[in-house]
Amino acid sequence: MKPKNSYGRQRRAFTGDAPAGSRWRGLALLAALAVVSGTVACGSDGSDTSADRTTTTSRGSDGEPATTSEPITSAPRSSSYVIDGRTVSMPCEGEGSIPVVLHAGGTDPHSVWDDLVAALGPDVLTCRFDAPGVGDSDPPAAPVTASARADALDATLTAAGLDGQVVLVAHSLAGQTARQLGSRHPERLAGAVLLDPTTRVVMHALHADLTADGWDAVAAEAEADAEVAWPVIPLVVLSHDPALGVLGPPVVEELWTEGQAEYAALSAASRHEVVTGSGHYLHRDATPVVAAAILEVLSRVREPE
């Protein structure tokens, strides 16, 4: 069963069943044409940064947890925390030296990560963050921005007693939260795995949908456009297979792939991988590949190059 997501047009487009004339595709295509014509640059200098970062893999690659002598942290007993007077849900399980925080996109609840958590097993400490207004968390006090979600995640980790660094796994719209967390709370990030993160051009295309779902769309778009500085950390960006055409016309798929390379450029210690045969929900379509990427980042964090 596919996870529910209030970003109806976005999700239908990603899963390939959007109506041909849907507003999302129309807006995304217009955004793509604007980029192609030079209205919006793909990189800070307008250059294509994807050439030396993108590889292709087939589904089914796997990895094993690295052994470590570092102190092991068990999952916090509580699954919810009061942040600024509102309850935020973040259930954790397993144990490990470095927490892996899973942040879903849109309004997907933390259950969207069930398959991935099972694949990682009990020797990885996983925490599934329900952003304010999502899943079991209370609605936010003010319209949503990625920076507000980043601050809420940082505060929730502190409330859970997880004061150190984490590996953040962010899907889709949560990629914008990841950008802000790395910029506003760089000490938090030991590494990151970004799953088909929403690009800045698409943020503009989703203006009406974001507004309908309680976002401050204007502020969110401004944050997406702004340059951010990240620490040099292990970073893996996994993208859906553009050959599937789940976003629409090839020009839109090309734009999306270029936007993924912008995320990879956040860290000098990154790689960008296009996962053959996977749609937008890589953690569901290519669970072993995502699990292997997380274990890779954990290993790189434990044993820096």
Image (cartoon, grey):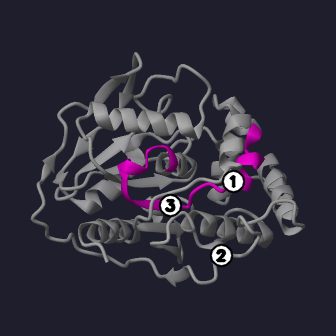
Residue 161, x across and y down, in percent: 23, 36
Quarter occupied by the C terminus: bottom left
Foreground: 43 or 129?
Answer: 43
Residue 153, x across and y down, in percent: 41, 38
Q: Mark 2 points at which residue?
A: 49
- Quarter of image, res 46: bottom right
- Relative height, residue 185 to residue 133 (above, below): below
Q: Mark 1 points at which residue?
A: 200
Tell me the amino acid under the disc marked 3.
Leu
Pointer 2 local density, CA inside 10 Å: few below 14, some 14–19, many at least 20: some
Q: Residue furthest top?
A: 85
Q: Residue 195 carries which label?
A: 3
- Relative height, residue 102 to residue 139 (above, below): below
Asked if the stretch drawn in magenta spans residue 184, the answer is yes
- Quarter of image, res 251: bottom right
Asked if the stretch drawn in magenta spans residue 14, the answer is no
- Relative height, residue 33 to residue 188 (above, below): below
Residue 50, x across and y down, in percent: 63, 77
Lower sequence index among marks 2 and 1: 2
Magenta segment, which residues? 183-207
Pointer 3 local density, CA inside 10 Å: few below 14, some 14–19, many at least 20: many
Tell me the amino acid under the disc marked 1.
Arg
**x 39%, y 40%: residue:** 129
Whether residue 245 can be seen here: no
Q: What's the distance in space between the residues labelled 2 and 1, CA to CA?
A: 15 Å
